[in-house]
Image (tube, rainbow, N blue to C red):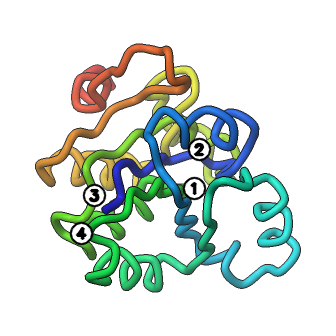
């Protein structure tokens, strides 16, 4: 079971490595990112950043969907990481009932699309029109979708943030 998918354009970094696995009581991290699955240098960097007490899987989004749907995952507590809202939506829709919630924490900062078209959801989340649409779709799936950067920060409903843009 994926206890939480975190949308974070940096994927694994200090806060994710040191705090979130403990907070969520997970034993594994599933990175669902097509680029990281193909790029040996990025995969090696992610492996170095992963805590030793967490098993790390780096898969394409399609392969991550297969992992999430594997019956052996039912009793595992896994933390999912994706770089975009669209990838989170693909994973949630591809593995119905296998994801407890989605945290849209840090997104859009490295997106090279037209800045004038981007919508700022909050300080750490700036989405292009396609990502805004994916965000709306994700909010309609029926699982909690929220924004929470740090483990001690309050959760904010993404649907409330979307209503303001």
Q: Is residue 104 left or right of residue 160?
A: right
Residue, disc 3? 99
Inter-mark Cα distance, 4 to 1: 16 Å
Q: CB of mark 3 within 8 Å of CB of mark 4?
A: no
Residue, disc 2? 108
Q: CB of mark 3 within 8 Å of CB of mark 2?
A: no
Residue, disc 4? 93
Inter-mark Cα distance, 2 to 1: 9 Å
Would you call the spot at circle 2 few (<14 residues within 10 Å), some (14-19), or many (20 or more)?
many
Viewer-nearest of labels 2 and 4?
A: 4
Q: Which badge, 3 or 4, is on the more N-terminal residue?
A: 4
User: Which of the pair 147/55 is nearer the observer?
Assistant: 55
User: Which of the pair 11/76 is nearer the observer?
Assistant: 76
Which residue is found at the position 45% from the left and 42% from the top? 25
Viewer-nearest of labels 3 and 1?
A: 3
Q: Quadrant of the N terminus?
A: bottom left
Point out which mark residue 159 bears: none
Q: Residue 148: percent from the left, percent from the top?
A: 45, 26
Q: Which badge, 3 or 2, is on the more N-terminal residue?
A: 3
Instruction: Place residue 86 in its image quadrant.
Output: bottom left
Under circle 1, the secondary element is loop
Q: Which badge, 2 or 4, is on the more N-terminal residue?
A: 4
Which residue is found at the position 28% from the left and 64% from the top? 92
């Amino acid at each position: 079971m994926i206890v939480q998918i975190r949308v974070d354009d940096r994927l694994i970094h200090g806060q994710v490595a040191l705090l979130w696995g403990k907070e969520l009581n997970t034993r594994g991290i599933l990175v669902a990112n097509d680029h990281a699955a193909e790029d040996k240098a990025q995969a090696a960097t992610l492996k170095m950043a992963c805590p030793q007490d967490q098993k790390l899987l780096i898969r394409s989004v399609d392969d991550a969907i297969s992992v999430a749907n594997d019956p052996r995952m039912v009793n595992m507590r896994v933390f999912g990481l994706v770089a975009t809202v669209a990838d989170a939506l693909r994973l949630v829709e591809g593995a119905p009932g296998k994801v407890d919630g989605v945290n849209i924490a840090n997104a859009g900062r490295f997106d090279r699309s037209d800045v004038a078209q981007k919508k700022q959801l909050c300080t750490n989340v700036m989405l292009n029109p396609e990502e805004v649409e994916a965000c709306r779709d994700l909010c309609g799936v029926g699982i909690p979708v929220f924004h929470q950067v740090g483990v001690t920060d309050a959760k904010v409903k993404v649907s409330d943030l979307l209503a303001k843009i």
